[in-house]
Image (cartoon, rainbow, N blue to C red):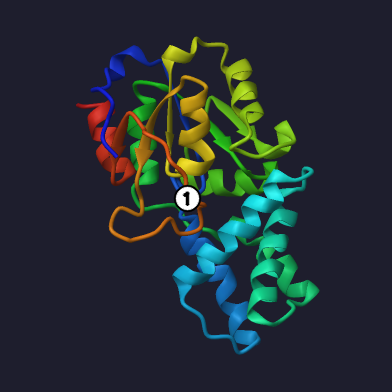
Amino acid sequence: MHPQAPLDYGRFEALTFDCYGTLIDWEAGLTGAFTPVLRAHEIEADGEDILARYARYEAAAEAGPYLRYRDVLAAGLRGVAGELGFEPTAAEAAAFSGSVADWPAFPDSTAALERLKSRFRLGVLTNCDDDLFAASNERLGVEFDWIVTAQQVGSYKPNQRNFEVLFERLGLPRERILHVAQSLFHDHAPAQRLGLRSVWIDRRHDRPGSGATPEASAVPDATFPDMASFAATAAPD
């Protein structure tokens, strides 16, 4: 991806972030949650293959009637398990569904957010339940000015309704908002359709494939390999 034109970061008042995949390492978290279940059922599988399988089931669950994210996670686990020929126990599904609270933050997320907060107001638009995001927010250790969850909206990105609620909460012109995210599918494609400028934090820049995110076509306005390099550019000393 190449930027459409250089961004003037001084024109933006608010930065809005995707959380999982951008700030929290959801692929490491998912891999860690899958590992004991696969081991218990004596399944050997490639980690990238598991993430790709999971992506399909999560996207399908999120596109249907609204479910809590815990239930989306359980649906993803059961879908992958069915392909691999086993059925997870209720206890395994419950542990998998609650694992979000244990997913680690990327090492650069907190310092980058603190740096950006000195110059911008910060928001989060996340495909998650309120309580699970609260646990992740504790790991990040940064107070956001706005938090919009899928639970609050009753739908999941890439549904444009999630972005419309974000716009309502912020009360700012769209040209004053910059959306920052990893997922082309969940974030950049709908942001592009809504005329929102966006920055791609390409956490998978050194790995092939799209991992736990369905593939999508979108052209972000700028691309960085991590939050640290983005923060250094958007909020220079």
Q: Count residues near mark 1 (Cα–Cα under 10 Å), then give few for <14, some for 14-19, many for 20+.
A: some
Pinpoint residue 135: horizontal percent, then vertical percent: 60, 49
Residue 71 makes an appearance in the image: yes
Where is the C terminus found, in terms of image quarters?
Answer: top left
Residue picked out by circle 1? 215
The local secondary structure at tag 1 comes to loop
Question: Considering depth in this image, is 183 or 13 the residue closer to the camera?
Answer: 183
Question: Considering depth in this image, is 81 or 123 the residue closer to the camera?
Answer: 81
Numbered circles on residues, count: 1
Question: Considering depth in this image, is 47 or 234 the residue closer to the camera?
Answer: 47
Q: Is residue 148 left or right of residue 115?
A: right
Where is the N terminus found, in terms of image quarters?
Answer: top left
Pinpoint residue 142: horizontal percent, then vertical percent: 47, 37
> Which image quarter: residue 92?
bottom right
Looking at the rendered structure, the kind of residue marked 1 is: Glu
Pinpoint residue 10: horizontal percent, then vertical percent: 29, 15
Pinpoint residue 25: horizontal percent, then vertical percent: 46, 55
Residue name at image x 67 percent, y 52 percent:
60
> Which image quarter: residue 80?
bottom right
Q: Is 82 above or below relative to 213?
A: below
Q: Is 169 above or below relative to 232?
A: above
Residue name at image x 28 percent, y 26 percent:
4
Q: Is residue 8 left or right of residue 156?
A: left
What is the residue that sits farthest to the front in this orientation? 217
Residue name at image x 60 percent, y 38 percent:
157
Residue name at image x 34 percent, y 38 percent:
112
